[in-house]
Amino acid sequence: MIGAKLTDQCLWLKHIEPGPLREALASIHPGSCIRLIVDGTQIDFERMATGKDGRVTNGFNPIGPGAAFWRARYREGEHQKIELSFAQSVDD
């Protein structure tokens, strides 16, 4: 398990501890999906699209049934510590 912070409606790479998980997530192409385990709950995330100006967006939006769990945990202005790990790829 890797430490991270839940600070927004999405998961930002900069809020994940440096290491293999963060590096692997950074290599995922925009629009691709990944399944992560967040504090024991599986949540699917989709890599954000590249911005209109061509800059990479270093974040993931929660999607599917797990998105409700993520958004219910989010509290505006709070930085909650969470634990992350890979579950599997959703795009297999």
Image (cartoon, rainbow, N blue to C red):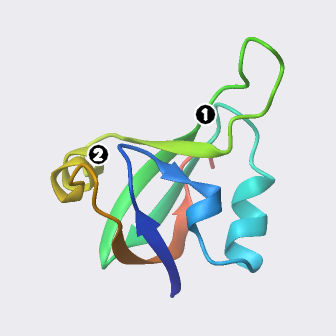
How crowded pointer 1 is (Cα within 10 Å; few <14, some 14-19, many 20+) is rated as many
Residue 67: which numbered mark, if any?
2
Image coordinates for residue 5, horizontal then vertical, percent: 44, 69
Three-letter amino acid code of the residue under disc 2: Ala
Q: Residue at x 23, y 47 (%)?
A: 71
In the displayed structure, 66 sits above or below 9; it is below
Disc 2 is placed on an element classified as: helix
**Residue 37 appears in the picture as rendered:** yes
Give the residue at mark 1: 48
Image coordinates for residue 85, horizontal then vertical, percent: 52, 77
How crowded pointer 2 is (Cα within 10 Å; few <14, some 14-19, many 20+) is rated as some
Q: Which residue is drawn at 35% across and 66% down?
A: 79
Q: How far apart are marks 2 and 1 (CA)?
A: 15 Å
| Furthest-top residue in this view | 52
The mark that comes first in sequence, 2 or 1, is: 1
Query: Residue 15 sits in which quadrant?
Result: bottom right
Q: Which of 62 and 76 is in front in this view?
A: 76
In the displayed structure, 79 sits above or below 11; it is below
Three-letter amino acid code of the residue under disc 1: Met
Disc 1 is placed on an element classified as: loop
Q: Residue at x 59, y 70 (%)?
A: 16
Query: Residue 7 sits in which quadrant?
Result: bottom left
Image coordinates for residue 65, horizontal then vertical, percent: 24, 45
